[in-house]
Image (cartoon, grey):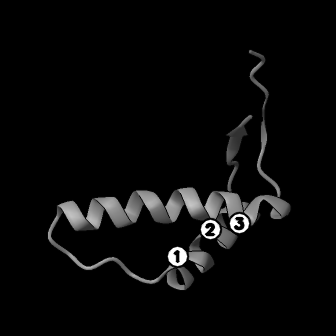
Amino acid sequence: MRLIISPAAREDLEAVLALYYGFFKELRTRQGLPPRSIEEYKGEVEEFLEKDRIFIAF
C-alpha cells in the first residue's frame, strides 16, 4: 500500500468538511451537547483551507 500525503486544497472542501463534521458531531454527542449543523462548520473549514496548512493522506 502506498501512502500519499499532500496539502489540502479548496477542491478538497467536501472531504475535509465530512471528516471535521464527523469528529465534532461525535465529540459534542459524548459531551452531552447537540451537534451544530454541517453548514455551520463549513465556514470554519473554508477558513482553514485558505489560511492554514491542512494535510490529507490517500
Residue 34 picture quarter? bottom left
Q: Is residue 51 visible?
A: no
- In this view, the residue farthest toward the front is 1
Residue 35 in the figure: left or right of residue 30: right
Specify the amino acid type for callout 2. Val
- The answer to whether the residues at label 2 and label 3 have Cβ atoms under 8 Å apart is no
Residue shown at the point (74%, 15%) measured from the top left: 1
- Helix, strand or loop at mark 2: helix
Q: Which residue is mark 3?
A: 14
Residue 58 picture quarter? top right
Q: Which residue is mark 2?
A: 45
Q: Is residue 29 visible?
A: yes
Q: Which residue is mark 1?
A: 41
CA separation, marks 1 and 3?
A: 11 Å
Depth check: 50 or 16 in front? 16
- Helix, strand or loop at mark 3: helix
Residue shown at the point (29%, 59%) measured from the top left: 27
CA separation, marks 2 and 3?
A: 9 Å
Specify the amino acid type for callout 3. Glu
